[in-house]
Amino acid sequence: MKNPALSLWLSSFNWWMGHATHAVRRQQRVALNEMTTSMKAVPGKPKRKRWRTARRKTV
């Protein structure tokens, strides 16, 4: 026999865990972005420039 109270409890628990996991990942992403942007400010090797081929003009 199915237990509707248990089903409701598990559904709400799953919802809360999803939101908690999202919040933790968001905080980790923000912290990682702050660390990497502070590293970019350190002088050192210059950034590589993208190499592009010259475009030919069609007449």
Image: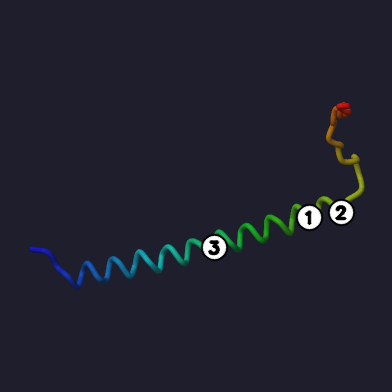
The amino acid type, in three-letter code, at marker 1 is Thr
Could you tell me residue 24's position as x and y percent? 54, 62
- Left or right, 6 with respect to 51, comes to left
Q: Quadrant of the N terminus?
A: bottom left
Comes first in the chain, label 2 or label 3:
3
Secondary element under disc 1, as helix, strand or loop, is helix
Labels in figure, total: 3
Could you tell me residue 42's position as x and y percent? 88, 51
Could you tell me residue 43's position as x and y percent? 92, 48
- Left or right, 26 with respect to 19, comes to right
Residue under label 3:
24
Q: Residue at x 81, y 51 (%)?
A: 39
Q: Quadrant of the C terminus?
A: top right
Please give the label number shown on residue 16: none
Label 3, label 1: how many angstroms apart (C-alpha)? 20 Å
How many residues crowd around disc 3 within 10 Å: few (fewer than 14), some, or many (20 or more)?
Answer: few
Q: Mark 1 and mark 3 in contact (Cβ < 8 Å)?
A: no
The amino acid type, in three-letter code, at marker 3 is Val
How many residues crowd around disc 2 within 10 Å: few (fewer than 14), some, or many (20 or more)?
Answer: few
Q: Mark 1 and mark 2 in contact (Cβ < 8 Å)?
A: yes
Q: Residue at x 74, y 56 (%)?
A: 35
Residue under label 1:
37
Comes first in the chain, label 3 or label 1:
3
Residue under label 2:
41
The amino acid type, in three-letter code, at marker 2 is Ala
- Residue that extends furthest to the front in the rendered view of this protein: 59
| Residue nearer the viewer, 24 or 50 | 50
Secondary element under disc 2, as helix, strand or loop, is loop
- Residue that extends furthest to the bottom in the rendered view of this protein: 5
| Residue nearer the viewer, 15 or 36 | 15
- Left or right, 26 with respect to 50, comes to left
Label 2, label 1: how many angstroms apart (C-alpha)? 7 Å
